[in-house]
Structure formats: structure tokens, C-alpha cells
Image (cartoon, rainbow, N blue to C red):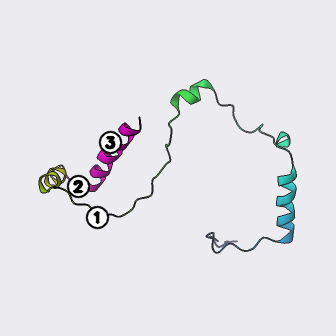
Amino acid sequence: MKKEMVSYTLDSLPPLTDEQRANLRALAARPDSEIDYGDIPPLTEAFWQNAVRGRFYKPIKRQITARVDADVLEWLKSQGAGYQTRINAILRREMLASVK
């Protein structure tokens, strides 16, 4: 028996039934002490040594118009494709340096 794939967006989700709402209320009322963490492996020191902050962080891009000196733009473009990405990387490096 072949089943069709169903997908939703936040705007197209069907409304919750009364039973679903009641289940959510019951879950919200339970104390955290009743949560079973038995299936979650403990986080060891080795895990934290290899952890990377913001590994899955993807900043939102915004389109802008900026004026750049012609020689700077030519230098960026001479390094190959992706000059806009390089501009962003340079600006991010400077931003992070100034935050420190």
C-alpha cells in the first residue's frame, strides 16, 4: 500500500483537536522531575572538548547596496568567484575582532 507524503507549513497546519489540546495541557502540567532522560547518552568531557559553538548557525542574509573603491573590488574579483562571500567574511572577521 503506497501512502502519499503530506507536508505542512506553519500557516497550513490543521488546527489541534480537543483531545490533542488536552494531551498538551496534561504534559505541560507534569513536573520536570517526571521526565525520563534514560535514552539520552551522558555528555562527557570528551564531548565538550570537540564541541563547536554555532556549528549549525546560519545567519540571515540581507541584500544591500554598498560603494567600494574600484581597486578594492577588482582585487576581490581577481581572486575568483565568490567575491561577495569574501567581503562578508572580511567584515565578519573585523566585527568579531572588535567584539572581543
Residue that label 2 marks: 81
In this figure, which residue is indicated by the disc labeled 3?
A: 94
For the residues labelled 2 and 3, the Cα–Cα distance comes to 22 Å
> Horizontal and vertical percent for residue 94?
32, 42
What residue is shown with label 1? Answer: 65
Does 52 appear above or below 7?
above
Magenta segment: 80-100
Q: Position of residue 55 (x, y in %)?
A: 49, 43
Q: Secondary structure at mark 3?
A: helix
**Image location (x, y in percent) of residue 78:** 15, 51
In percent of width and height, residue 18 lies at: 86, 70
Q: CA distance from mark 1 to mark 3?
A: 19 Å
**In the picture shown, does residue 22 fall above or below 29?**
below
Q: Residue 39 got which mark?
A: none
Task: Check if residue 43 falls in the magenta segment.
Answer: no
Residue type at mark 2 is Ala
Q: Residue at x 27, y 49 (%)?
A: 86
Image point (53%, 27%), residue name? 49
Q: Amino acid at mark 1?
A: Thr
